[in-house]
Amino acid sequence: MSVAPRSLWNIHVAIGEAPAVVRVNNLHATVKGPNDAWGRRNRPQPIQISVKVELRKPFSATSRADALASDTVHYGQLSKAILTSLERLAAETAAGRAPCPLSLSEVLTCVWLDLTGFYPTGGRAENPEPFLDTSVVRCLEMTAHLPKASLVGDGVSLAFTGVFGNDLDGTSMRLYGRTLRLHNLRVPTLIGINDNEREAKQAAVVNVEIDNFEATCDFFNSLEAKIVDRMENSSFGTLEALAADLSETITLYLRVEREEPLDGTGSQLKITVEKPLAVPFADAPCVELRTNTRDVPLPAKYN
């Protein structure tokens, strides 16, 4: 049985803080299938996988005996399990057993299935032989980052979050969420209120987070292109105006071009904008804007 998607904020509010956590950060590998920076499919590129395993209880038995017990997760074996999943996908692709090039979401789904025995939407797999014992795992967050999948930024990432619960029928997945991020897009932009800032463009740095994200295809290249085109061909006095304009641009893209379901709760957007040259002897000033695609009005011609 599938469960309704939730935003990361709703998930974290619902489950609170974990008593114990095991992490593996930036596990490096190579993947073939997802779009590269030019939108080409099935080209080899680097991928980084990060996993955060929140445990249901503190790892008391392991800490008392100073030896691994069933109340924790072996981070070395976890790393190997992730790499084994990616290697299996690569072998299936090379042998022609994969029906078509896999998207980033599909790659992450395959690894998630191998680790948990559940689909990212909450349904249990028919033949689960998972690596993790989800009876001791409260929440799992897994992020796949493609550092070379952007022409102007530091790549794109997709994260799955799942919350597991125990009941009389065994372990189930009660909540899940999906988040797409575009990292550090550096775009020449005419922005500022000072006379010198109106004479030439300067680099603005934008980070975009789309929470409660439902699409499974790779469209991050076209979304990046929309953002870059808007910033390069517009003029702004303030970072606040730029952030609000990008919120409208992304909402228009998701709701009109990507046809975001009208009966859904909408995607949660978080947009941060920095202007590195604004203050010579301090870090770049930054503004952050959070909106929901259902709350941003569309131009009249789209209503």
Image: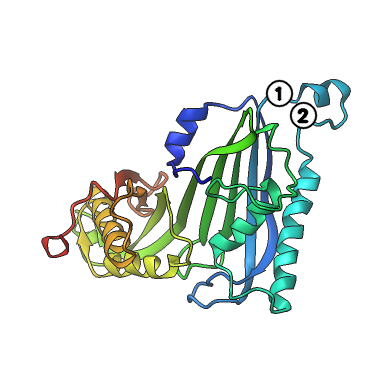
- The quadrant holding residue 88 is bottom right
Residue at 12% from the left image edge and 65% from the top image edge: 301
Tell me if residue 280 comes above or below residue 299 in the rendering.
above
Observer-side mark, 2 or 1, equals: 2
The residue tagged with tag 1: helix, strand or loop?
loop
Residue at 55% from the left image edge and 63% from the top image edge: 104
Question: In this rendering, would 178 be left or right of 145?
Answer: left
The residue tagged with tag 2: helix, strand or loop?
loop
Question: In this rendering, would 272 be left or right of 132?
Answer: left
Residue at 48% from the left image edge and 49% from the top image edge: 178
Q: Which mark is residue 58?
A: 1
Q: Which mark is residue 71?
A: 2
Question: In this rendering, would 29 be left or right of 283?
Answer: right
Q: Quadrant of the C terminus?
A: bottom left
Q: Nearer the viewer, residue 119 or 152?
A: 119
Q: Which mark is residue 34?
A: none
The reply to whether callout 2 and callout 1 are in contact (CB within 8 Å) is yes
- The quadrant holding residue 111 is bottom right
The answer to whether residue 138 of the structure is visible from this angle is: no
Q: CA distance from mark 2 to mark 1?
A: 8 Å
The answer to whether residue 263 of the structure is visible from this angle is: yes
Q: Nearer the viewer, residue 257 or 168?
A: 168
